[in-house]
Image (cartoon, helix red, strand yellow):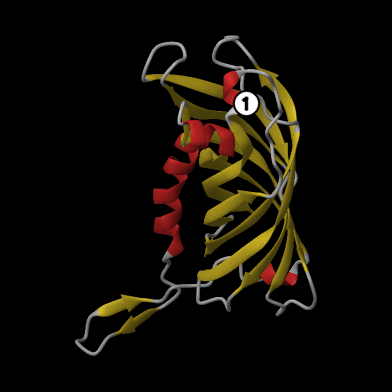
């Protein structure tokens, strides 16, 4: 999918500028006039689409005060790459000139989140043990998009909303590396910025979005890793490539 987008971009970029008629500039040379692609796009109240996403995801963690005081175990969450795919449904709120769009964008993400524990006692002094939470998550973001006026074939927008998430499956391939566990549901606050680029056959939206979890995902267990934490939540930054018609 990423390769297809990479192949489409140069072709679409060349098609972005078409000479509808020739004009002479001040120096006597000919210059081209850029036409508006998809001129009736905003007249339609609903626009379907799809997206692919690349995410840097980590768990925001808080250690238990007991373990902080003892100093036996310290924890550090690290960023891990994540791939996601999904669909888009945009519904305009109001007349065609309204800047507000309601977006529903369900999708699937394949997450592997890691926390490194440094312990003075387990299993060896000053050793680092990595715990992984690997899961397939279904997201149901409901977002409000505020877009600027269109300038030829581009416009900026801001987007924000909430995203419930449901864990479809959790993979625990190594009992020693998968002792740390997370609950199966989450709710995240999402916000970001993007750019609408109008091409002759479709609209491309590169978008950067930030996500912060509102729930404590920690599942209490008797292992040393779970006991050393009192809270963990989602924290991620995602690049979306949205395509709509």
Nearer-the-camera pick, 167 or 205:
167
Residue 179: image x %, image y %? 61, 17
Nearer-the-camera pick, 175 or 166:
175
**How many discs mark residues in the rendered view?**
1
Hey, which residue is sitting farthest left in the picture? 27
Nearer-the-camera pick, 95 or 63:
63
Instruction: State whether residue 4 appears in this view.
Output: yes
Kindly identify the residue that appears in the image at 28 percent across and 78 percent down. Answer: 30
Kindly identify the residue that appears in the image at 57 percent across and 29 percent down. Answer: 228
Residue 27: image x %, image y %? 19, 87
Q: Indicate the quadrant where residue 222 lies.
A: top right
Residue carrying label 1: 226
- Asked whether, in this view, residue 205 is left or right of residue 143, the answer is left
Secondary element under disc 1, as helix, strand or loop, is helix
- Give the quadrant of the C terminus: bottom right
Instruction: State whether residue 89 appears in this view.
Output: no
Q: Indicate the quadrant where residue 135 lies.
A: top right
Nearer-the-camera pick, 79 or 205:
79
**Residue 83 position (above or below residue 127):** below
**Residue 119 position (above or below residue 175):** below
């Amino acid at each position: 999918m990423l390769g297809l987008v990479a192949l489409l971009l140069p072709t679409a970029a060349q098609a972005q500028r078409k000479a509808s008629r020739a004009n002479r500039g001040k120096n006597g040379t000919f210059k081209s006039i850029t036409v508006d692609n998809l001129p009736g796009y905003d007249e339609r109240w609903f626009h379907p689409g799809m997206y692919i996403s690349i995410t840097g995801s980590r768990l925001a963690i808080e250690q238990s005060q007991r373990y902080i005081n003892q100093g036996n175990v310290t924890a550090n969450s690290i960023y891990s790459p994540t791939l996601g795919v999904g669909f888009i449904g945009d519904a305009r709120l109001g007349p065609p000139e309204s800047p507000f769009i309601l977006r529903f964008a369900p999708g699937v993400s394949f997450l592997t989140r890691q926390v490194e524990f440094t312990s003075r006692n387990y299993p060896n002094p000053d050793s680092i043990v990595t715990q992984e939470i690997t899961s397939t998550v279904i997201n149901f973001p409901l977002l409000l998009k505020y877009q600027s006026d269109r300038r030829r074939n581009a416009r900026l927008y801001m987007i924000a909303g909430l995203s419930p998430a449901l864990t479809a499956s959790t993979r625990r391939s190594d009992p020693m590396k998968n002792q740390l566990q997370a609950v199966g549901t989450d709710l995240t606050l999402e916000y970001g910025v993007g750019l609408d680029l109008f091409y002759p056959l479709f609209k491309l939206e590169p978008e950067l979005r930030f996500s912060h979890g509102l729930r404590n995902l920690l599942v209490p267990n008797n292992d040393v890793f779970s006991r050393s934490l009192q809270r963990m939540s989602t924290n991620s930054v995602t690049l979306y490539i949205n395509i709509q018609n």
